[in-house]
Every structure is written in C-alpha cells, then in structure tokens.
Image (tube, rainbow, N blue to C red):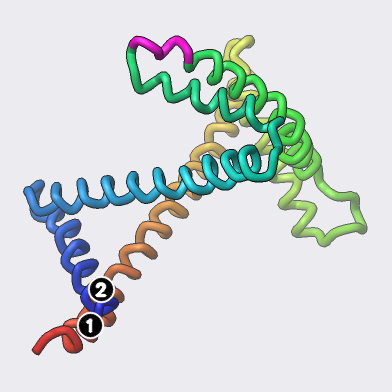
C-alpha cells in the first residue's frame, strides 16, 4: 500500500517537472525545490554518518585511534565557513586538504591517465594486431598530434602549422560531436525510463490505491 502510494506521489512529481515544457509555473518550482531540498538533506545525513560517525567518532572515541584526531580537528575548522567572523580559520584546513590531496592524486593520475594515454596513442607493431587496428591507432596518433599543434600558441598558425592545426580542429569537432551525441543518448534514455514509469508502473499503482 505505502509503496504504491509512493509511486503515485513520484508520478505526480514527475508530471510537475514535465509541466516546465508548457512554461515556468509554481508547480514546477515546488517540485524542483522539493527535489533539491530532499537531495541536500539526504546527502547531509549520509555524509554525516559515513564520514563523521563511521570514520571519526567510532575510530577515535570507541576504538582509540587518536591519530585520526588531527584530521577531525581540521574538518571542524572547515565549519568556520558558516560564520563570517571565523571564515579565516577554515583557510588553514582547506590549504592542508588541497595540498595533501594534490600530492596524493598527482602521481596516481600521472601514472594511470597521462602515461597510459600516451602509451595507447602509439600504434602497435606490425604483426601484433590486425590491419584495421593499426590504421585506427595511426588515425588516433594523427589526431592527437594535430590537436596538440592547434593548442600550440607559441608559433603563428600559418603555413604547415596552420594546415595541421586545421586538421586538429576537425578532430576536435568530431570529438565534441561524439561527446554531445553520447550526452543526448543518456538524456533520451532517462526520458524513456520516465515514460515507462508513467505509462506502466503508475497506472498499476493507481489501480491498487484507488477505490
């Protein structure tokens, strides 16, 4: 019963969001503000229990891992952002967090993304892959090189440099188009899911909840 009632409420809120297709209206604003408020409340509670309780309070005050105490103090200092008088205190915690996180991420990102991407740019040796794989790798190499030339601003884009940079523009447009198409496909997939919910799940729940 309560599950069907929740589906009915979700259907009404979905229709309220779709009402923006007509024009901006109070029903849409109510659904939008409700979504933002519920999402914010959910994540505040989720992060409070997953971070403050499970990773700080329990290890420090119940298991005796006092070496986590300085990190907790830095986290508390970040709350100074909520009061204008004490905002300067949060800068120390933010500076430590940015420096520590950068030092932790830079080597791993350099290894896992940049070096791996550079290695993947070079075509495989003849005999180790099919002809189409080698041609595709060569195409990627040409695209990466021409795009790098396009972003090389220390030389004027004339002559050979200009022609190569224009090839880089073509590769960039193809990449942007593919990314845009992928994004549109994702949004259309979400829209199809909402329509399936409205025309399949919602009528069934209305039949069970109704008289």
For the point 78% across and 36% down, which residue is it?
A: 111
Assign the C terminus to one quadrant of the image.
bottom left
For the point 39% across and 65% down, which residue is it?
A: 189
Residue situated in front as seen by the camera: 11 or 91? 91
Circle 2 residues within 10 Å: few <14, some 14–19, many ≥20: many
- Residue that badge 2 annotates: 7
Label 1 sits on a secondary structure element that is helix
User: Which comes sooner in the sequence, label 2 or label 1?
Assistant: 2
- Residue 107 left/right relative to 99: right
Residue at the right extreme? 127
For the point 60% across and 45% down, which residue is it?
A: 58
- Residue 104 left/right relative to 38: right
- Can you tell which quarter of the image residue 13 is in? bottom left
Q: Are marks 2 and 1 in contact (CB under 8 Å)?
A: yes
Label 2, label 1: how far apart the Cα atoms are: 7 Å
Q: What span is in magenta?
A: 85-89
Q: Position of residue 77 (x, y in %)?
A: 49, 21
Residue situated in front as seen by the camera: 153 or 90? 90
Q: Is residue 164 visible?
A: no
Q: Position of residue 172 (x, y in %)?
A: 54, 37
- Residue that badge 1 annotates: 205
- Residue 210 left/right relative to 67: left
Residue 158 got which mark? none
Label 2 sits on a secondary structure element that is helix
Q: Is residue 23 visible?
A: yes
Q: Main secondary structure of the magenta part?
A: helix
């Amino acid at each position: 019963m309560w599950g069907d009632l929740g589906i009915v409420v979700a259907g009404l809120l979905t229709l309220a969001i779709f009402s923006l297709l007509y024009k901006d209206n109070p029903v849409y604003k109510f659904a939008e503000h409700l979504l933002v408020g519920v999402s914010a409340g959910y994540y505040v509670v989720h992060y409070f229990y997953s971070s403050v309780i499970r990773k700080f309070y329990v290890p420090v005050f119940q298991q005796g891992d006092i070496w986590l105490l300085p990190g907790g103090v830095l986290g508390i200092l970040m709350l100074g952002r909520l009061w204008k008088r004490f905002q300067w205190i949060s800068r120390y915690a933010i500076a430590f967090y940015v420096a520590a996180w950068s030092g932790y991420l830079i080597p791993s990102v350099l290894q896992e993304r940049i070096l791996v991407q550079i290695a993947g740019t070079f075509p495989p040796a003849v005999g180790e892959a099919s002809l189409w794989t080698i041609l595709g790798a060569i195409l990627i190499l040409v695209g990466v090189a021409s795009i790098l030339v396009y972003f090389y601003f220390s030389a004027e884009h004339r002559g050979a440099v200009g022609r190569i940079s224009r090839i880089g523009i073509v590769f960039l447009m193809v990449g942007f188009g593919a990314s845009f198409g992928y994004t549109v496909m994702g949004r259309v997939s979400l829209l199809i899911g909402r329509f399936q919910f409205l025309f399949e799940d919602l009528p069934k729940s209305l039949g069970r909840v109704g008289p």
